[in-house]
Image (cartoon, rainbow, N blue to C red):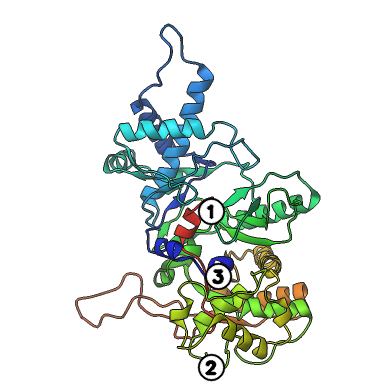
């Protein structure tokens, strides 16, 4: 997300690590093959030790069975997903159950089932690092063989109703450590929950594939942020949508995405954050590239990162963030950059160092939700990308018009939309080579490269 684009050195190193799937307690064995696999694996687990002479409690056994089926289903997603996850990031912290948790079992049961599965040779486990990395559970070759032997497919996986789609988190942007916050239902949250149900319904009904393969259930959630757990429960900061496998998909794999059998186009709001800052102060932005700071015209990516960071600070920055100095020409300091940014954008300079970023992000998310709902009402599935969408190529013009109309309704003026390139693999001119997926890319100028954090940043707590 934008507030994490300037990562500490330690976090930056994690971006190179492989992708993990985040454990979803609402995934369920739906098809007969997966139900049979879950039962077979449950029978392979060692029974818990109980006091001699006592019978095992029926409710405890049922909790273990449900937990095992859920874990197996998540591991099947890791095994069969074309996204090629290397493991399952599992939250095992002991906390009071909240609106975000299933009530059928808790982390204690999940931890024991994972331990039993590891002893049975079904999974390998990478232990968690306190406040940094979750436990990662990976299926072994034995587990994969059982999946194949039972003929399980992603179509056997169902998503149970009941998972919360409107989440509230508290925590520090600098530490990256966030805490889920319980809240009391209110009309505002109910309305947003209904919106998410409509969006997820459209995506569930759409034929979304990667490399021609099914990708499993899709369930997006919307995450809001407060600073401290004691703060008032409000839904006016952050608000972005998460949970789509495509969000962290490397650029060179996006050509493998299809919706309804069609390749996708990537549509983005140009210079979105600076545009929203100008909307916030009620002034039209200047013409041209809003990230073209004089003297840094050839360093757009670094300028974008630093510009965005100014909206998330609540105090004047003294030093360039780690890694930024190397991305700038010699002689540039944080003080010099901020002076240049203020001179180039005097109208929005008062917003720098005011921590207005999360409010701007909330406006951005409102625009995106409005676009998804409008497209969905016309039967058009769109894959959200924070400040843009991907749609089937045949829906390009309709989607662009919708983005412009919804943004005008939300912020008072139509925001500019650009199409970003989705390039296929390099063309091989050898007569012995042929491509099954196609090799033609879209030759467009990348006017506004999207900035996201890798799945490994999400792999951190929470």
Residue 383 seen in the figure: yes
Viewer-proximal residue among 96 and 102: 96
Viewer-proximal residue among 49 and 153: 49
Viewer-proximal residue among 278 and 376: 278
Q: Residues within 10 Å of mark 2 (few under 14, many from 20)?
A: few
Viewer-proximal residue among 78 and 327: 327
Report whether 8 appears left or right of 428.
right
Numbered label attached to residue 218: 1
Q: Do tag 1 and tag 2 residues touch (Cβ < 8 Å)?
A: no
From the image, tell me which residue sits under label 2. Answer: 295
Relative image position of residue 281 (x, y in whole percent): 77, 79
**Residue at image point 51% right, 27% down:** 63
Numbered label attached to residue 391: 3
Q: Do tag 3 and tag 1 residues touch (Cβ < 8 Å)?
A: no
For residue 380, which quarter of the picture?
A: bottom right
128 relative to 310, above or below: above
Q: Earlier in the sequence, mark 1 or mark 2?
A: 1
Q: Secondary structure at mark 2?
A: loop
Q: Residues within 10 Å of mark 3 (few under 14, many from 20)?
A: many
Q: What's the distance in space between the residues labelled 3 and 1, CA to CA?
A: 16 Å
Q: What's the distance in space between the residues labelled 1 and 2, CA to CA?
A: 44 Å
**Residue at image point 39% right, 29% down:** 42
**Mark in front: 3 vs 2:** 2
**Mark in front: 1 vs 2:** 2
404 relative to 245, above or below: below
């Amino acid at each position: 997300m934008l507030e994490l684009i300037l990562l500490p050195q330690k976090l930056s190193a994690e971006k190179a690590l492989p992708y993990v799937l985040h454990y979803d307690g609402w995934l369920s064995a739906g098809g007969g093959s997966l139900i049979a696999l879950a039962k077979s694996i449950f029978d392979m687990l060692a029974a818990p030790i109980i006091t001699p002479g006592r019978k095992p409690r029926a409710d405890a056994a049922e909790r273990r069975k449900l937990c095992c089926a859920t874990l197996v289903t998540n591991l099947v997603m890791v095994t069969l997903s074309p996204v090629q996850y290397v493991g399952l990031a599992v939250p095992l912290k002991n906390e009071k159950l909240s609106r975000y948790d299933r009530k059928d079992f808790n982390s204690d049961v999940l931890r024991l089932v994972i331990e039993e599965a590891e002893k049975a040779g079904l999974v390998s486990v990478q232990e968690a690092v306190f406040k940094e990395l979750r436990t990662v559970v990976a299926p072994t070759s034995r587990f994969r063989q059982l999946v194949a032997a039972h003929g399980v497919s992603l179509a056997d996986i169902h998503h149970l109703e009941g998972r919360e789609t409107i989440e509230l988190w508290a925590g520090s942007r600098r530490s990256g450590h966030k805490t889920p916050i319980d809240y009391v239902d209110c009309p505002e949250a109910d309305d947003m929950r209904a919106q998410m149900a409509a969006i997820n319904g459209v995506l569930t009904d759409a034929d979304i594939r990667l490399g021609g393969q099914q990708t499993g259930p899709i369930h997006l959630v919307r995450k809001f942020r407060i600073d401290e757990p004691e703060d008032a429960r409000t839904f006016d900061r952050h608000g972005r949508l998460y949970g789509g496998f495509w969000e962290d998909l490397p650029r060179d794999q996006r050509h493998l995405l299809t919706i309804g059998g069609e390749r996708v186009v990537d549509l983005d709001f140009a210079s979105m954050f600076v545009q929203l800052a100008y909307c916030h102060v009620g002034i039209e932005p200047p013409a041209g590239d809003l990230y073209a700071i004089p003297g840094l015209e050839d360093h757009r990516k670094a300028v974008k990162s630093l510009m965005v960071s100014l909206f998330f600070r609540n105090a004047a920055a003294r030093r360039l963030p780690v890694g930024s100095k190397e991305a700038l020409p010699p002689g540039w300091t944080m003080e010099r950059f901020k002076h240049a940014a203020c001179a180039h954008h005097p109208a929005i300079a008062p917003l720098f160092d005011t921590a207005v970023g999360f409010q701007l992000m909330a406006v951005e998310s409102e625009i995106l939700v409005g676009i998804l709902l409008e497209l969905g009402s016309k039967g058009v599935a769109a894959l959200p990308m924070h400040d843009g969408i991907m749609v089937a190529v045949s829906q390009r013009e309709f989607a662009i018009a919708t983005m412009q109309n919804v943004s005008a309704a939300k912020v008072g003026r139509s925001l500019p939309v650009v199409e970003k390139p989705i390039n296929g693999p390099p063309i091989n001119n050898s007569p012995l080579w042929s491509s099954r997926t196609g090799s033609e890319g879209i030759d467009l100028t990348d006017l506004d490269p999207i900035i996201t954090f890798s799945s490994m940043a999400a792999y951190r707590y929470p």
